[in-house]
Amino acid sequence: MSTQKGNTSRTRPQKHKNRTAFKNSLHDTNHRTKMINSIQVSEVCVRCKDIIEWKIKYKKYKPLTQPKTCTKCGLKNVKKAYHVMCTECGRQLGVCTKCCQSKEVIVAEPPEKEQLKLDNELKALLQSLPERKRRTFLRYLDKKGKEKEEKIEEKSSKDTTAEDDRKDLLNKLNSLKMNDEDDEDFDDFIDSDENKDEEDDSDVS
């Protein structure tokens, strides 16, 4: 580039170019680097997510040594670096926890192990239910799906996470199972009353 005043244009390409892409764990395989590489960036907008991921990729990320104070609630609940607001306040206000702007926020997905565990629990509970309760649960699933589609169309900021949805489904299944057990106890009571009536009829005859 010329040193002439006002001449900021350059026609030639840059002189030094990397032949291979930078890899932050090529010569550094300690526990801290592995932990930083496994960080799942969430509760932030797309732009802030790109910034934090760039820091992780090029080894510029500096994790917190102790929790920071939230700018909203004033409690030391901020456990992620470069975030200025805690997750709870960010969800309540529907804003990015880094730039504090009301943008579309990226929600964290549950870990694969936890997700598989919840899915297996759902399947086991669903198989243990009788046909009538199973149909009730399937109708409940359809209703939840329609509500979620309506929220997406309305672009509601107070949308539930996948983890919250699974917990809600587990609670619904457990309540159906409890109702089923109560129905079985009631059926036993009815059967015992019918047997007693039959015995009374036989005594009369």
Image (cartoon, rainbow, N blue to C red):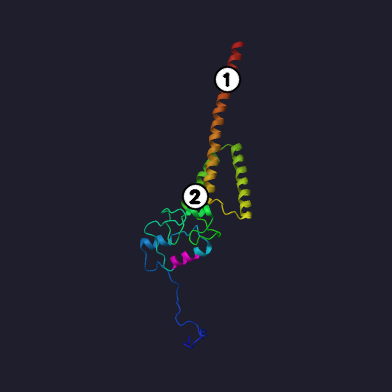
Identify the residue position indicated by label 2 in the image. 116
Identified by mark 1, the residue type is Asn
Q: Is residue 9 left or right of residue 146?
A: left
Q: Which residues are magenta?
A: 50-57
As for residue 20 lying within the magenta part, the answer is no
Q: Quadrant of the C terminus?
A: top right
Q: Is residue 74 left or right of residue 136?
A: left
- Residue 27 lies, in percent from the top left, at 37, 68
Q: Is residue 110 at all visible to an observer of this figure?
A: no
- Nearest the viewer among 61 and 125 is 61
Most frequent secondary structure within the magenta stretch: helix
Q: Position of residue 163 (x, y in %)?
A: 51, 50
- Looking at the picture, which amino acid does disc 2 mark? Leu
Indicate the quadrant where residue 71 lies.
bottom left
Residue at 53% in and 35% down: 178
Instruction: Find disc 1 in the rendering and name its residue.
Output: 195
Mark 2 Cα-neighbour bin, 10 Å: few <14, some 14–19, many ≥20: few
